[in-house]
Image (cartoon, rainbow, N blue to C red):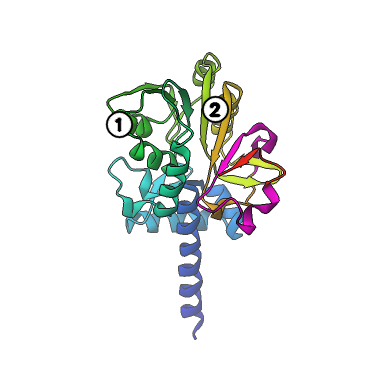
Amino acid sequence: MSILESKVLLKKERQLQIIHQINLHNKILSSDLSLILNVSEDTIRRDLNELASENKIVKVHGGALSKSYNVSATQADTYAYDQKKIIATKMIKLIKDGMTILTSGGTTMRAIANQLPNNLHVTFFTVSPLISLELAEHPNVEVIFLGGKISNISKISVGGEVVSKINDIKADLCVLGINGFDPEGISDSDYEVVQVKKAMIKSSRQVVATTISEKLNSDLRLRVCTLNEIDYLITELSPSHELLKPYHDLVKYIL
């Protein structure tokens, strides 16, 4: 193999890793990709521009999004969609008529919104424009979008105004889509998103963390909460699965 062929192969492998990280977390910062892959941010920016031109990702200032963050995204665009459907089915069993629910964004929450029974009478407060549109399709669901500055990376409302609105809510459930989950707690890479999620947790009687199992035992740079602050962990796995055993003493309920 020539040096040129070797460089091309390394680039392809790196770009496959970039696509995987973006699909896994739905969005990611260029600086985080640089650390994960141990290459310069200039290299990451060139890769992101190339992948965006091939319609494999969505490039935004400071990072990139998965194609599933698009309003017109299909099931085929959603990473691990079958696993997220299983999570949604489990999550919906916790929702009762009359509840007030706080939600973040993400493709797992989108799967939950798509599967809600039409006869369910609940109120959702959400910081995600996309999720608010999905929820509004249900005739008996009251949807309140907590507007403010929209993060170009996370595609949710962030900032002090939104946090203040959340602080005034008394929710029965908080449903969190998460990016990092390990025995130390829930973590994320976006400071403003972390502040919103912290406020949601404080304003809710019970907290539900939803994640595909691939994100278990991953740790990002900013702490959202410790595991004793959540009530439910929901993955696509059976609660007795080997991968979940370390969490049974740390989380109240695993579904």
Q: Residue at x 52, y 23 (%)?
A: 172
Judging by the rendered image, the residue that carries numbered circle 2 is 196
Type of the residue with mark 1: Asn
Which of marks 2 and 1 precedes in the sequence?
1
Residue 238 highlighted magenta (yes or no): yes
User: Which span is picked out in magenta?
Assistant: 221-247
The residue pinned by badge 1 equals 118
Q: Position of residue 224 (x, y in %)?
A: 63, 35
The correct choice, above or below, for 24 with respect to 194 in the image is below
Q: Is residue 69 left or right of residue 1?
A: left
Look at the image and say whether residue 255 sits in the magenta stretch.
Answer: no
Going 33% across and 34% down the picture, which residue do you hit?
117
Residue 154 visible in image:
no
Relative depth, front residue between 110 and 130: 110
- Where does the image place residue 152, in percent across and percent down from the top left? 43, 36
From the viewer's perspective, tell me whether residue 173 is left or right of residue 217: left
Give the answer, above or below, for where 222 lies relative to 1.
above
